[in-house]
Amino acid sequence: MWEVTFSRKVKKSIKSIPERIKYQLFTLIKEIESQGPVRGNWPNYSKLNKNKHHCHLNPKGKPTYVAVWETIDKEIRIVEVIYVGTHEKAPY
């Protein structure tokens, strides 16, 4: 089991995203918790570097919402979601 935490910025941004995107985000979080941070089954998933990952939360439509998460500790199994929002403002 992996522990998933949220950055302070993500906690604030979750309040303003559409409900359907929140549902997708929490589905992603459940998968990360049970299966780990590598989520190749999600649309446009990619590993950004050794510890950072991203995927689209809505595969079609404008704006496109993305999630970016980072593996903090592989032994203790901690992942932090560091960004949730539109594709244009994503930190990569």
Image: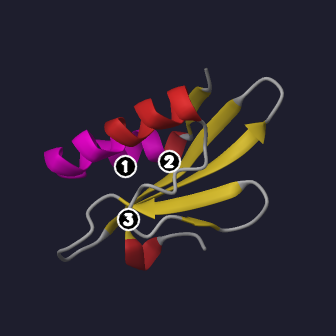
Category of crowding for the residue at label 2, using alpha-carbon neighbours closer than 10 angstroms: few (below 14), some (14–19), many (at least 20): few
Return the residue found at the far front.
Answer: 41
The answer to whether mark 1 and mark 2 are in CB contact below 8 A is yes
Quarter of the image with the C terminus in it: bottom right
Which label belongs to residue 13?
Answer: 1
Q: Please state which amino acid type lies under the numbered disc 1.
A: Ser
Quarter-wise, where is residue 5 in the image? top right
**Disc 3: which residue:** 43
Magenta: main secondary structure equals helix
- Specify which label sits upstream in the sequence, 2 or 3: 2
Front in this rendered view, residue 49 or 8: 49
Describe residue 58's horizontal placement relative to residue 51 as left or right. Answer: left
Q: Give the residue displayed 49% in from the left and 64% down from the top.
A: 45
Q: CA distance from mark 2 to mark 3?
A: 23 Å
Describe residue 79's horizontal placement relative to residue 26 as left or right. Answer: right
x, y percentage for residue 14?
33, 44
Quarter of the image with the N terminus in it: top right
Q: CA distance from mark 1 to mark 3?
A: 21 Å
Element under label 2?
A: helix
Q: Give the residue displayed 68% in from the left and 57% down from the top.
A: 52
Quarter-wise, where is residue 61 in the image? bottom left
Q: Please state which amino acid type lies under the numbered disc 2.
A: Lys
**Disc 2: which residue:** 9
Looking at the rendering, the stretch of residues picked out in magenta corresponds to 10-25
Question: Mark 2 or mark 3, which is nearer to you?
Answer: 3
Number of numbered markers? 3
Describe residue 63's horizontal placement relative to residue 25 as left or right. Answer: left
Question: Mark 1 or mark 3, which is nearer to you?
Answer: 3
